[in-house]
Amino acid sequence: MDFSPEKMLFEVDNSDESFAGGVSLATKPRVRKLTSRTDKRVAKTRTKLLKAALEVFSEYGVDAATIDDITERADLGKGTFYRHFGDKREIITCLVGDAIEHLISSLNNYKTKSNTIEDVLEQLLDVHYNFFIENSEEFILLFQGRLLLKLDRKISEQMETPFNNYLQQIENHISPFVSEKVDIIRIRRLACAVAGFVFGFFSFTMIGIGTDEIATSIKPLRQSFVRSLSVFLAQ
């Protein structure tokens, strides 16, 4: 007979007459399932709060939005919020971390082959453009998060690592196409320039400009930008 925990749970689950020391074991699987349902319910509530917070921060701004706004949008009580997050800073940090992971995933999943540094820079801009179009709320949050890094010391300590990871990913894409003689600091500046260009441009184009117009207006700018960065690396 197999006495492994998994096998015993399976056998007990299919028999109401299993006993050990005179105590029924049939209740164990039901406790396990209840825990599983509880975990799912907790995860569902947390996801609901995160989704509501992302919408609220996008609409009102991180600074102006309140916990009341978040819980009202999620249709949950403030007590529920505080069971999942200590304060507004914590939920902002979680959202920024998730958004950066999403953006990094988009960068790493870009499949087009690159042959030159110009190709890489164009592709990096393409990924950011598509991310902005498809995930505008996350993009807005990341733009606000960059400002918080400068304005709020407490939150900057928590968000600095995700943003550094993001810059590191840009550097990883650029480095194979750069001469070994190029200083690593210059590559980091280039990564910052790419991030600054896309975040700066899109943050202003969100004001009353349609998707097609954004694509048209950014094309000549990005061409000049890519040429300038290529010259910067060649110096």
Image (tube, helix red, strand yellow):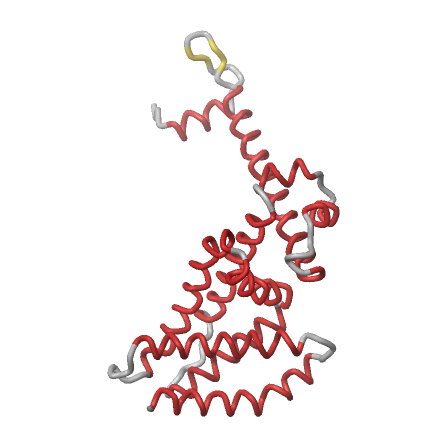
Quick one: quadrant of the C terminus? bottom left
Rendering coords of residue 188 (x, y %) = 37, 74
Residue situated furthest left in the rendering: 181
Q: How many marks?
A: 0
Closest to the observer, 24 or 153: 153
Closest to the observer, 217 or 10: 217
The residue drawn where x is 64% and y is 47% is 49
Q: In the rendered image, which quarter is residue 202 located in? A: bottom right
Residue situated furthest top in the rendering: 22
Rendering coords of residue 222 (x, y %) = 53, 87
Q: In the rendered image, which quarter is residue 129 located in? A: bottom right
The residue drawn where x is 69% and y is 50% is 66
Tell me if 5 is positioned left or right of 88 in this view.
Answer: left
Rendering coords of residue 194 (x, y %) = 47, 78
The residue drawn where x is 57% and y is 41% is 86
Quick one: quadrant of the N terminus? top left
Tell me if 11 is positioned left or right of 128 in this view.
Answer: left
Up the image or down, 202 lies above or below 221; here it is above
The residue drawn where x is 47% and y is 10% is 23
Rendering coords of residue 171 (x, y %) = 37, 73
Closest to the observer, 50 or 59: 59
